[in-house]
Image (cartoon, helix red, strand yellow):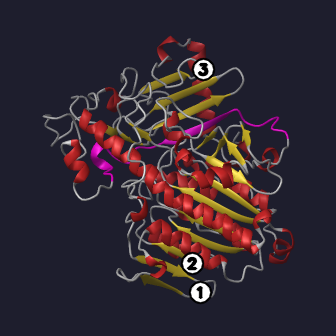
Amino acid sequence: AAATGAAAAATGKNIVFLLTDDQDALLGRSDEYTATGSLEAMPQTQKLLVSAGARLQNAFVSTPICCPSRTEFFTGNYFHNVRMPNGAGGCMHADTSGAADATGLFGSFDGAGYDVGIFGKVTNDQGSMLEALARQTSAYIDSPLDFNDYDGLDYYRAFPNGTNFTETLNETNPVFGTTYQTAQIGNRTLRWLDGDRSKPFFAYVGPHAPHFPAQPAPWHAGAFVDLALPRTPNYNASREGKAAHAAQNPPLSERAACWQAHHFRMRWASLLAVDDVVGALVDRLTTMGVVDDTYFVYASDHGYKQGQWGIGTSKQHPYELDVRIPVIVRGPGIAAGATLSPISTNVDVLPTLLDLAGVAGAGGVDGRSWAGWLRGGSADGWRDRLLVEYESVGTYFNDHSPAWEDGNSTTASCGGPMPRGPEGANTTTCVEGEGVCYFVDSEASNSWRSLRILNESEDTTYVEYDSTWSWNESSVEFYELYDLRVDPYQTRNMYENASAARRAALHAEVRAYYACAGGTCP
């Protein structure tokens, strides 16, 4: 049972959970992977969270796309346990309803007597999700309805007394002086914090950045003009040994690379406003005298790649750039400047936050709490492997993710719009296997489940593809196997070299993990 409001008020720690969108963990100012990736763009976050808290260096998501991943964060359950029956409907195949109910992240804190504030993107079915949260919790909600529009005017507002309405910003004289969404989210959070915070609080802050179009704040539009696109060893590398949609991709053109470089700069520029929000939140809680009683958790809903393996700008794949995320935790009992290595995943966030706050959740979730080893305890017996799952949400191409540009400037400097295929190719109709278009997802060949193993003797990614999502003994269509100790950029598929016994063992393990629920999950 959840803790009573009185118990929470007496013992609970405050929680600030910041969840960005599409923020990678590995692409920095180098042509190799870096330890902090896009966090390099965020000096305040590095000073106030990374240096003052712990960075989880082996943090992953269980599904590398927005809506399923966010549902996993908010319910503590793997994709196979939040997937819609037969995969039909839902939000990118996920049943998001659990994110709003009493056992979800927001409902658990609400039921424990916390003041709950929700600011920013929650799930991709944003309007219905915010309405459900308003009905099923007493949370204070102040969030953009159209998170895809960085200058969107409509904000859904709901109050603990049951009142709710849509606020439309005055475009020429907006509250807080700007329509820019990240600044609005930050200022709306600060406004709530300035209210009566006599009870412990849980603040969820969900900026859309750096998701495409990665529009920076007007005051950051000129940032990072000299930043180069990381040409990592797997950038535009051979697609040999990849699933059909990736294997058939033609080499990325210089126009594609030009747009990727621009997109990379805009992603970092858009993160500067997020960095400002982090700085403002820490400053405000310091002024309030509660910063030392507050846990800050910073994460992204998945990673991102930009031309690696010749796939273009996307997530959706079982590779390190897609599934690794930045995760930082600062708060009481957590050693400043620590780097922690246990393998963690987004389904762990719900039980971890409840545990850090001293709140008893409903239990039965798939994830496990990090609280013990975050606060210096032993990680003995902790998992050394995890399941990652992705069911294709459609067949689409490199030009699906346009980056913000100042007028027509990038189109002009790159020699045309972001391309769907090489110059001169007929990309009006894209047929998988013809090698004409830059595929980034495919209903025919990009539904998969993966086992990620990481311990002292093994660093492995094993993948099975099944476009029917049947997962019977005859439905698996393709396999991948990477030894990241010798192939950290995942360019050599070693499945054909593996012994029959090794193949059988990996298949048996991923099949068993896929069937897990609650306490049976590793």
Q: Is residue 66 left or right of residue 439?
A: right
Q: Which residue is found at the position 70% from the left and 32% from the top?
A: 384
The residue at which mark 3 appears reads as 485
Query: 22 or 364, which lies in front?
Result: 22
- In-front residue for pair 502/133: 133
- Left or right: 122 in relation to 410: right
- Range covered by the magenta-colored residues: 378-403
In the depicted structure, whether residue 462 falls above or below residue 402:
above
Amino acid found under the numbered disc labelled 3: Arg
Local crowd size for mark 1, using a 10 Å CA cut-off: few (<14), some (14–19), many (≥20): few
Position of residue 69 in the picture relative to residue 243 (left or right)? right
Spot occupied by residue 426 in the image (x, y as percentages of width and height): 13, 37
State the mark number for residue 515: none
**Amino acid type, residue under disc 2 in the picture:** Ala
> Which label sits on residue 134?
2
Q: Is residue 103 visible?
A: no
Q: Is residue 487 above or below residue 135?
A: above
Label located before the other in sequence (1 or 2): 2
